Image (cartoon, rainbow, N blue to C red):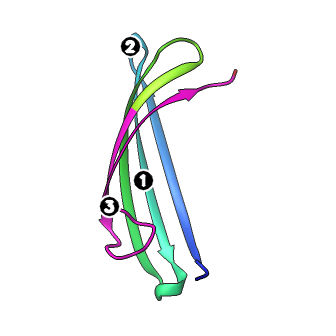
Amino acid sequence: MHQSFTQFRLFILTRWPNRFYTGIENQLTVDHRRNGRVGFTIETEVGRFIDKHWAAWVRPGIALLGDGLPYIYNRNMEVGFRYLFD
């Protein structure tokens, strides 16, 4: 089945002392195949820079709108490492 949706994302990151950072990402999704139904998720991220290039993070998320839309989850948890290029 062909998917037709539009997503708007905003990610805000704040750096803290001792190489820690926090971030929040809001995602608004408009599903065009389901009469413009709207989904909204919010994720928070907490991470720490291990060195100049590597960071480790954890990112829980929750859906506030959009129950039943195929690409909107109810709850989410991500853990990972990130490499940053200069």
Q: Distance of mark 3 from mark 1, alpha carbons? A: 10 Å
Q: Position of residue 39 (x, y in %)?
A: 40, 70
In terms of sequence position, does the residue under pointer 2 or pointer 1 come before the other? Answer: 2
Residue at image mark 2: 17
Residue count near mark 3 (Cα–Cα under 10 Å), binned few <14, some 14–19, many ≥20: some
Residue pointed to by mark 1: 26
* Quadrant into which the C terminus falls: top right
Q: Secondary structure at mark 3?
A: strand
Reading the image, the residue beneath label 3 is 63
Q: Secondary structure at mark 2?
A: helix
CB-based contact (under 8 Å), mark 2 and mark 1: no
Answer whether labels 3 and 1 touch (C-beta < 8 Å): no
Tell me if mark 2 has few (under 14), some (14-19) or many (20+) residues whose alpha carbon lies within 10 angstroms of its own: few
For the stretch drawn in magenta, the main secondary structure is strand
Mark 1 element type = strand
Relative side of 26 to 54, left or right: left
**Residue 6, position in %: x, y?**
57, 70
Residue drawn 41% across the image and 30% down it: 57
Q: Is residue 17 above or below residue 46?
A: above
Q: Magenta segment, which residues?
A: 58-85
Type of the residue with mark 1: Asn
